[in-house]
Image: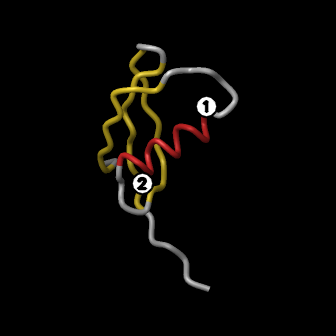
Amino acid sequence: MTVAQTTKYVIKYKLNGERRFEFAQLADGTEEQAKAALDAIHRDTDDVISDIAVSKAL
């Protein structure tokens, strides 16, 4: 079994127009991966996620 290498990223985004951020372990920090992580966090709501920006956490 091969384990995927991940890196800790900070995801900055807006949730219903309010600035927020989350940390996530992602394979390569693409916006698609970040969106999937945010969808998993906010999966049971009708919240609007926008303005996604991803960068490596310090």
Q: Nearer the viewer, residue 23 or 42?
A: 42
- First in sequence, mark 1 or 2: give its number: 2
Residue 27 percent coordinates (x, y) = 43, 63
Q: Quadrant of the N terminus?
A: bottom right
Q: Nearer the viewer, residue 25 or 50?
A: 50
Residue extending furthest toward the right: 44
Q: Is residue 57 above or below residue 26?
A: above
- Left or right for 45, reference 13: right
Q: Which mark is residue 42?
A: 1
Query: For the residues marked 1 and 2, what is the alpha-carbon distance in whole angstroms?
Result: 19 Å
Residue for point 31% across, 50% down: 56
* Residue receiving disc 2: 8
Residue 16 percent coordinates (x, y) = 48, 15
Q: Nearer the viewer, residue 32 or 9?
A: 32
**Mark 1 residue type:** His
Residue for point 43% across, 45% down: 34
**Mark 2 residue type:** Lys
Question: The residue tagged with tag 2: helix, strand or loop?
Answer: strand
Q: Is residue 53 above or below residue 47?
A: below
